[in-house]
Structures are given as C-alpha cells and as structure tokens.
Amino acid sequence: MKHLDERAAELADAQREQWRATYTAHPGLYGRRPSEPAVYAADLFTSRGASDVLELGAGHGRDTLHFAGRGLAVHATDFCAEALAQLRQAADRAGLGERVRVSVHDAREPLPLNDASVDAVYAHMLLCMALSTEQIHALAGEVRRVLRPGGSFVYTVRHVGDAHHGTGISHGDDIYEHGGFAVHFFTRALVEALAEGWVGLRIHAFEEGELPRRLWRVTQRLP
C-alpha cells in the first residue's frame, strides 16, 4: 500500500500535467477580464500604498495584467510553464512587460523571495488546489515570511458549501476530484486557523463560473 505522502505527490504531479494540457489546448482559458477578487485586491493594495505584489497561481495572467495596469509591479508564479509563457506574451503585447516578472513555482516548495520583500500577496483559488492541510499551512507561513510588516494577503478558496464538496473522487483531507481537477474545500475553521497571528480578517462569500462555484474571498494583513 502506498504511503500517504507518495499518493499526495502522485496527485500533485497528475494535477500539473492536467493544467499543462489544459492551458496548451485552451490558451487564455479564462479570458482577458480580471476576476472580481482581483479588482477588489487591486483597489485594496493601492489604497494601502503597495507598490509590488506577489501573485500565486497566476495562470495565463488575466489578474496579473490588471495589477500591472494599476501601476503595481507583479511577480507572478505558477507551476505551469505553458500558462506563464502565455502571461509573458500578453504582458508584452499590452506594454506591461516591465512591470511583470514570472517564475515557475510549485506551491509545495518555499517561495523564491527574500524575507519581508513584498507589500502584498494575492492568490485566486491557488490555496484550494490539491494541497494537504499541512501544505496549506506551510504556504501561509511562507506568505507571512515574504510580506513586509503591514502587508496584505488576499486569497480565494472554494469552501464546503460548494455543490462539488463531498462528491467525485475523494483523496482525503477534504480534497475531491471532478473532471480531472482536484480541489481542497475549505472549512471556516481552516480559514481562521490560517489567520492566527494576522489582523483584520474579513471573509466575503461570492460565486463564480459554472455550477456556480461557491467561494470565500479572504483578506488579512500582518500587524
């Protein structure tokens, strides 16, 4: 019988291949318009005087370009090189290339930034990918490490009120797979645990896309 860590690694590798194939077959998968959370986050970050933002799970960059268009310098990361190539091309075409830097990065690994080096961090549905609860906590710790004092963290996750929660292929730890894509559905307790030591926690419920997906937009900042 395979060890839990081995099964988790195999799932993560399968998810990387699933996203690679998806972005290759469907360039610009989510269109050019920014997501609602990105519009909110850009307003928040600029109102708090941020000049740079780290975006986790940037995909092909619809939100990245919105941040750059608002004058923010963006370091966009994703584990899919194909998506980041599309992002780089889109940024150059939009004349925003100088404000955008991209890095291939697996969220299970430490962030490729120095301590206290960015003003804000943003992640739209990255934390609810095929990550274990332990890995999610480790990633939140890395976000805390790279943020400057007073820095803001905005992230979105699908939650246990979503229609897909509890259905499809179960991988344990509230991770369920539909159509080849695995999602870790968040509980309120997990959100609150990730906010320990932070201030200004705000949880906003919203819906997006087909089904529709039910999500929380979470806002918190360092003291």
Image (cartoon, rainbow, N blue to C red):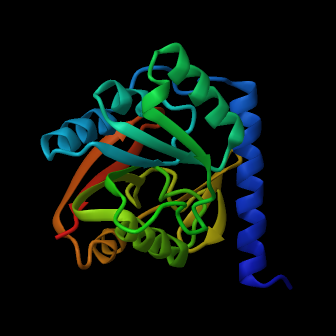
Q: In the image, 139: left or right of 161?
A: right
Q: In the image, 123: left or right of 129?
A: left
x 24%, y 38%: residue:
40
Give residue 216's position: percent from left, percent from top: 32, 52
x 72%, y 82%: residue:
4
Image quadrant where residue 223 sits: bottom left
x 74%, y 45%: residue:
18
Give residue 137's position: percent from left, percent from top: 45, 75
Say whether residue 71 is visible. yes
Residue nearest the observer in this picture, 92 or 129: 92
- Quadrant location, the N terminus: bottom right
Q: In the image, 13: left or right of 86?
A: right
Say whether residue 124 is visible. no
**Which residue is the extreme one toward the right?**
1
x 62%, y 36%: residue:
84
Image quadrant where residue 140 sits: bottom left
Is residue 152 shown above or below 108? Answer: above
Image quadrant where residue 118 sits: bottom left
Is residue 46 shown above or below 65? Answer: below
Give residue 98's position: percent from left, percent from top: 46, 28
